[in-house]
Image: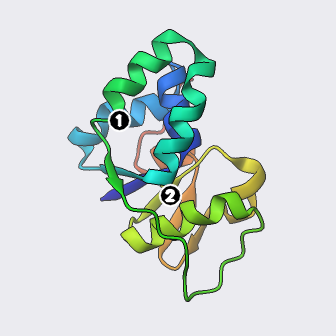
């Protein structure tokens, strides 16, 4: 299953060894999840990962080689109900990639879409995704 990671999830995976985002990156292969993100998200992570310290930057160096980076898609013929223009490329790239899941921690901008499907793609948080996948007893 293709799982698209928003930059907030990638930053969390790099910034905290105890985050559920990190857990997802660690168990993806054994669970059959193919992790993808976009060039737009890669640039956003590169700009911000230094704020989390040297260890996060080192983790980013490793993690970025484990993700598939898809080209940015900036337009869609389908209407989208997303007010934050900075996040439209993330959603459009996810839909263009045909990922089944979009993981995000951006509750402000993606909040209204959380738990819903947008043209066949579920928008959810790492916690809800892991619970949906049968990993109920999660500790942060």
Please tell me whether mark 2 sits on a helix, a strand or a loop. Answer: strand
Residue 29 vs residue 13: left or right?
left
Inspect this view and state whether residue 131 appears: no
Q: Quadrant of the N terminus?
A: bottom left
Residue at figure coordinates x 72%, y 48% from the top left: 107
Query: Which color scheme did the rendering employ for the protein?
Result: rainbow
Q: How many residues crowd mark 2 within 10 Å: few (<14), some (14–19), many (20+)?
A: many
The answer to whether 116 is drawn above or below residue 6 in the figure is: below
The answer to whether 65 is drawn above or below residue 33 in the figure is: above
Inspect this view and state whether residue 84 appears: yes
The answer to whether 129 is drawn above or below residue 52 in the figure is: below
Residue 59 vs residue 41: left or right?
left
Q: How far across and down, in percent of the image, does residue 106 sit?
A: 68, 47
Q: Earlier in the sequence, mark 1 or mark 2?
A: 1
Please tell me whether mark 1 sits on a helix, a strand or a loop. Answer: loop
Q: Which residue is mark 1?
A: 64
Q: Which residue is mark 2?
A: 102
Residue at figure coordinates x 52%, y 65% from the top left: 122
């Amino acid at each position: 299953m293709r799982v698209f990671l928003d930059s907030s999830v990638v930053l969390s995976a790099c910034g905290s060894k105890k985050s559920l985002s990190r857990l997802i990156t660690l168990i993806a292969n054994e669970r059959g999840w193919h992790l993808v993100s976009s060039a737009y998200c890669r640039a956003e992570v590169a700009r911000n990962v230094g704020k989390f310290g040297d260890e996060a930057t080192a983790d980013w160096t490793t993690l970025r080689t484990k993700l598939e980076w898809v080209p940015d898609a900036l337009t869609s013929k389908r209407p989208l109900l997303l007010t934050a223009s900075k996040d439209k490329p993330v959603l459009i790239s996810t839909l263009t990639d045909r990922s089944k899941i979009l993981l995000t921690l951006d509750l402000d901008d993606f909040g209204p879409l959380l738990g819903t499907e947008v043209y066949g793609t579920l928008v959810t948080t790492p916690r809800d995704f892991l619970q949906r996948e049968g990993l109920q007893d999660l500790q942060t």
